[in-house]
Image: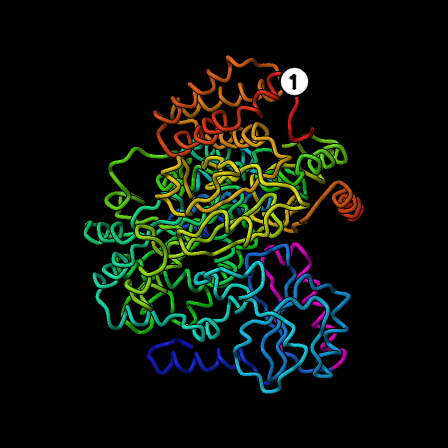
């Protein structure tokens, strides 16, 4: 059915509420790429078989990933009159017991992690439940401010009804029926939203300029070429709540006067590609994409283009080259994409996370959004905390949250009683912050002051056994592989840096080579065409300065501290 | 690959802008390669120079101008996988399949590649076999998986 008016929206909402809070028992299995990698499909099948065997009536749904893949496969079990219960690392072997318990109206015990929203009215107080913490009070969810990830892992990502029940599409309905495009832009400007892909450019300002550019056609490109190794926040949004992203893309189109959107998806996300295509078809069926969206007269089509596995295509001008069927080479700017972008038409390129913020801003107002974050950096940021911490995963926190708190309190600190040596914020281009300087606010301004950056939010924690030379060696091979080869400082400079680093790594270089490495780094940093060559030297220059001991170990003894 | 099959794929995307990447992906998915013959025919059908199409097929790491293995093994070497022991896993893959990174086994059953992040960073190291990904790997686990997969492919 197509949603045409408020009445339709309410009707769909009601269906969604019934589906989210059913009268009978329900099981939800997290079936994103990570869940599937850890056996969620076997789990789903086993539950289906048990249902058939026992004849029990249980509604079975799928959900996306909550950001903590190491807890997968996750399941949510809902028994009548009780809050939803979250189970982690559920095994096929435990299914029979779960079904038996549900049949007896008992709470399954194995793998029970927390309740989800225990404040909801429980008809029968259960002594067992009193012992179980709510997810807001339990690591790794404690202390998060989940707005973008709110629905991820909870709702069925392909259910329009469930998304609408969680206030989805109220922003688009409001914008298309009650707001002029310039009013949408005004709210986004007011919110202070800035680009989450790493450049932190003011989104509202970009949209305003694009709306004023003239062209027979305009484009909205959603940059889903999530290439920073260690990042998977965009995948989590796309697989956990794709409709929120679509809503944001259509809002962007309406704001700048564009009728065509493209999601440029990174090649490595095989499962996501098919999944998003299904989501687009569903959105079309409900009149949320395509012609006459929500019966407002506004048309907007959306399609997905898969990249070819090139990191530099995450850079917006290279991305547009790639979409035009060329090899991905960054272009010189100006002209900027907002004037002459894709096929020389005005184009905005926004990251998945950025666009997913927009429905929240339109729904609650720019003023509301402005209250979250720091003076200059508004909203939340999804951090991908990985490496040597107890609970690696995605942490959505207000900008300005303390790094130390994220590493030690939220992510549980280092493993096996070891100590943290350094943390690379904004990997791969960010610098390594030594353990004694982690008391820093996570926002672009504060990090810039200490010579670092937040980038797309990848935070790599390294413990005492890590060697900075080893990590830099790893990063440099990555940069060299992904350099497009267009400009000399990056193509030649970064390659020579890698050669030197290999010599240093193997103990075949002297301290003199460190100086050459430094000099090469400064040249590539200052003269490269795009952020790849310009950004690559930062961690190396900083590593030489702050972690000289690691270099000396390699140079003098040829030994890597990592293996000592 | 048969000309008719290529025509079918090209025609499917004929009216789309930015169709060429999709066409290359689909032809490769069918034929496990993008050989010169296919690329020339795609160029002819689209009316673009062969050099352009060849450029794309060689610039993007997802494409291969040589025949790839029926099962493509992609070992992740992102930062998280690196920290958690990807090297060891990759060494096992190389020695058991008896090929280097970027090569295909003699019977064309397996191809081995390194990728920079499969996006499963909190359950690393990861390796994917076509569309199936295995996570939280170590030496023993990957040996077990290989044994099973290689047994199945026989």
Give the total of numbered labels.
Answer: 1
Residue A117 appears at what percent x and percent y?
Answer: 53, 73
Instruction: Please indicate, yes or no, whether residue B141 appears anywhere in the rendered image.
Output: yes
Q: Is residue A276 above or below residue A528?
A: below
Residue at position x 40%, y 59% from top?
A356
Horizontal side, residue B20 vs residue A420: left or right: left
Colour mode of the rendering: rainbow
> Measuring 70% from the left and 83% from the top, which residue is drawn there?
A105
Label 1 lies in what chain?
Answer: A
Q: Circle 1 sits in a helix, a strand or a loop, which is it? A: helix
Choose between A488 and A409: the one closer to the eye. Answer: A409
Percent position (x, y) of residue A110?
73, 68
Q: Which residues are magenta?
A: A26-54
Residue that lies at the very extreme toward the front in this rendered image: A436
Q: Residues within 10 Å of mark 1 (few under 14, many from 20)?
A: few
Left or right, residue A463 beside residue A111: left
Q: Quadrant of the C terminus of chain A?
A: top right
Residue B4 visible in the current orientation: no
Vertical order, B140 against A331 (above or below): below
Q: Give residue A341's position: percent from left, percent from top.
A: 29, 44
Residue A171's image quarter? bottom left
- Name the residue tied to disc 1: A557
């Amino acid at each position: 059915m197509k949603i045409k008016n408020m009445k339709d929206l309410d009707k769909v909402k009601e269906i969604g509420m019934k589906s989210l809070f059913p009268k009978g028992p329900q099981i939800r299995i997290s079936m994103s790429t990570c869940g599937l990698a850890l056996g969620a499909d076997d789990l789903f099948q086993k539950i289906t078989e048990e249902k058939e065997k026992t004849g029990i009536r249980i509604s079975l749904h799928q959900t996306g990933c909550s950001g903590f893949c190491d807890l997968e496969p996750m399941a949510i079990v809902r028994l009548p009159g009780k809050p939803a219960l979250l189970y982690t690392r559920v095994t096929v072997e435990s299914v029979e017991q779960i079904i038996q318990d549900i049949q007896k109206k008992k709470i399954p015990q194995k793998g029970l992690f927390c309740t989800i929203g225990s404040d909801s009215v429980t008809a029968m107080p259960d002594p067992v439940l009193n012992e179980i913490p709510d997810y807001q009070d339990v690591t790794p969810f404690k202390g998060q401010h989940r707005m973008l990830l709110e629905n991820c892992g909870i709702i069925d990502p392909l259910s329009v009804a469930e998304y609408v029940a969680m206030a989805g599409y109220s922003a688009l309905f409001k914008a298309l029926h009650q707001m002029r495009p310039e009013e949408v832009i005004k709210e986004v400007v007011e919110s202070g939203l800035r680009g989450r892909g790493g450049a932190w450019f003011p989104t509202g300002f970009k949209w305003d300029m694009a709306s004023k550019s003239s062209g027979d056609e305009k484009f909205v490109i959603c940059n889903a070429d999530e290439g920073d190794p260690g990042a998977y926040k965009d995948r989590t949004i796309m697989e956990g709540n794709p409709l929120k992203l679509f809503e944001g893309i259509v809002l962007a189109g309406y704001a700048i006067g564009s009728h065509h959107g493209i999601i440029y998806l990174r090649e490595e996300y095989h499962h996501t590609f098919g999944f998003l295509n299904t989501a687009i078809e569903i959105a079309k069926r409900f009149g949320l994409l395509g012609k006459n969206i929500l019966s407002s007269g506004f048309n907007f089509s959306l399609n997905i283009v898969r990249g070819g596995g090139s990191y530099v295509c995450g850079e917006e001008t290279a991305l547009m080259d790639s979409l035009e069927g060329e090899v991905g080479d960054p272009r010189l700017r100006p002209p900027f994409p907002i004037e002459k972008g894709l096929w020389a038409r005005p184009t905005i390129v926004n990251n998945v996370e950025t666009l997913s913020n927009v429905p929240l801003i339109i729904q609650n107002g720019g003023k509301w959004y402005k209250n979250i974050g720091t003076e200059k950096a508004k909203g939340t940021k999804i951090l991908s905390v990985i490496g040597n911490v107890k609970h690696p995963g995605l942490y959505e926190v207000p900008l300005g949250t303390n790094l130390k708190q994220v590493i030690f309190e939220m992510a549980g600190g280092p493993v096996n009683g070891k100590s943290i040596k350094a943390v690379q914020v904004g990997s791969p281009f960010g610098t390594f912050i030594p353990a004694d300087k982690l008391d820093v606010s996570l926002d672009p301004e504060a990090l810039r002051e200490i010579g670092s950056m937040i980038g797309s939010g990848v935070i790599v924690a390294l413990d005492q056994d890590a060697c900075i030379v080893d990590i830099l060696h790893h990063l440099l091979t990555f940069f060299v592989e992904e350099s497009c080869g267009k400009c000399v400082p990056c193509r030649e400079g970064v390659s020579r840096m890698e050669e030197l680093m290999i010599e240093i790594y193997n103990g075949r270089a002297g301290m003199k080579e460190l100086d050459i490495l430094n000099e090469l780094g400064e040249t590539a940093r200052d003269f490269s065409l795009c952020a790849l060559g310009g950004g690559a030297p930062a961690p190396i220059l900083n590593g030489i300065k702050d972690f000289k001991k690691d270099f000396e170990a390699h140079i003098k003894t040829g030994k890597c501290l990592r293996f000592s | 690959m048969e000309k008719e099959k290529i025509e079918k794929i090209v025609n499917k995307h004929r009216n789309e802008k930015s169709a060429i990447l999709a066409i290359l992906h689909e032809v490769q998915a069918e034929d496990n390669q993008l050989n010169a013959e296919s690329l020339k025919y795609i160029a002819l059908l689209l009316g673009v120079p062969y050099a352009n199409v060849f450029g794309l097929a060689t610039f993007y790491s997802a494409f291969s101008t040589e025949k790839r293995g029926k099962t493509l093994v992609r070992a992740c070497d992102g930062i998280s996988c690196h920290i958690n022991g990807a090297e060891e896993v990759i060494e096992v893959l190389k020695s058991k399949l008896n090929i280097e990174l970027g090569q295909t086994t003699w019977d064309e059953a397996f191809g081995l590649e390194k990728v920079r992040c499969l996006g499963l960073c909190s359950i690393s190291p990861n390796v994917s076999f076509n569309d199936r990904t295995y996570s939280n790997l170590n030496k023993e686990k990957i040996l077990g998986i290989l044994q099973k997969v290689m047994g199945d492919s026989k």
